[in-house]
Image (cartoon, rainbow, N blue to C red):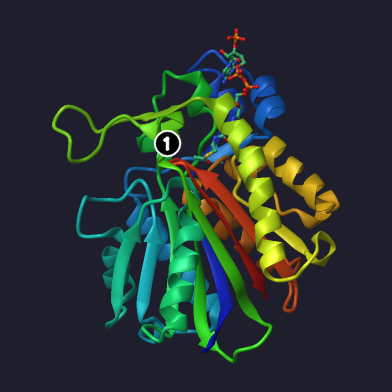
Amino acid sequence: LPGVHLVGAGGYLPEQVVTNSDLALRVETSDEWIRERTGICQRHLAAPHETAAYMGTRAAQAALDDAGLQAADVDAIILATSTPDQAFPATAARVQAALGVPGGFAFDLAAACSGFIYAMASADAFIRNGQARTVLVIGSEVYSRILDWSDRSTCVLFGDGAGAVVLRAGEPGTRGILSTHLHADGGFGDLLYVDGAVGRPDRPGTLRMQGREVFRHAVAKLSASVDEALAANGLAHADVDWLVPHQANKRIIDAMGRKLGLPPERVIVTVDRHANTSAASIPLALAEAMRDGRIRRGDLVLMEALGGGMTWGSALVRM
Ligand code: ACO
């Protein structure tokens, strides 16, 4: 079986930056409340032309450039999103055309904030069983279009953006994706959901969340997830070089860092500047830390996420 190597990463953020104080002009909130409860200081919000396909294409191109590869090298695109441009074609197929990828296959995947982990696991399986050699894994989200802008308990938490990585078949061995672990429990579906859909005549829907309950599940389930990933590989907490968590809330991120015994500088944090970009948050954070030289070849990186579904999971990667 081939190894599955992570050979490039890239991101895209909308130009428009909206601070907490800007939001305080729209809803009854404050910079202080948002910072203290979430660690968020600002978020990027998409302009009308910045759709999931548009941003996903730019993030994917940046990831290909980082990998030193061309569109023609790609033979599969898996795009995680809860905010596709259209019900169909899949946003992944739009990205394929925009990049000029000449063949292969492309599809979208819906697992809310866990979407990137689900997409990594899927790409890993396709590469291992020989159905693809070079896969673009993208998370691209415009939650600004599914937020209830009059609900202060949710609208302050999210931002828009896209991130992507290139996974490639390589030498088997100790480098690359060591394992992925996925979970879902639809019994908790009503803790975090969108109360509508493209297919519903009455409403496109906006996001609803029981924040406190989601918080409780996130800390418990992600803790178990982290242990599961390390145990599966016979590794200990101390072996992890970097935690690249889904960026929902600084308090959840800090809890995971403490659980692993990692110093804060070994935990990649973007939630302060990006807020929660759902499926885009992990590849955006990873791309930033690879670009600025923090994460280097040989480092052991643990990624984890929890989101609507409820879905959660992890991926352990030797860079
Ligand atoms: N500004 C000011 N006050 C607010 C705001 C706001 N934006 N939002 C809520 N409040 C008020 C509430 O009305 C409440 O007031 P009350 O006590 O008078 O009723 C008070 O603040 C406390 O509200 P809680 O919801 O209990 O606050 P909590 O400390 O739980 O923080 C938060 C809320 C930040 C949403 C937290 O629960 C959280 O982060 N949960 C996890 C949510 C999350 O991360 N979701 C995404 C994960 S999954 C995914 O990524 C899709």
Residue, far top: 28
| Horizontal side of residue 207 vs 65, given as left or right | left
| Horizontal side of residue 159 vs 71, given as left or right | right
Q: Provide the secondary structure element on which disc 1 rests.
A: helix
**Which residue lies under the disc numbered 1?**
187
The kind of residue on which mark 1 rests is Gly
| Horizontal side of residue 175 vs 166, given as left or right | right
| Horizontal side of residue 246 vs 13, given as left or right | right
Q: Position of residue 164 (x, y in %)?
A: 49, 65
Q: Position of residue 218 (x, y in %)?
A: 61, 39
Q: Residue 104 is drawn in which quadrant?
A: bottom left
Ligand 1 position by quadrant = top right
Residue drawn at x 64%, y 71% as measured from the top left = 317
In the displayed structure, 162 sits above or below 45; it is below
Report crowding for label 1: few under 14, some 14 to 19, many 20 or more residues within 10 A (C-alpha): few
In the displayed structure, 31 sits above or below 268; it is above
Nearest the camera: 154 or 258?
258
| Visible residue check, residue 199 | yes
In the displayed structure, 171 sits above or below 224; it is below
Residue drawn at x 30%, y 70% as measured from the top left = 106
In the displayed structure, 307 sits above or below 61; it is above
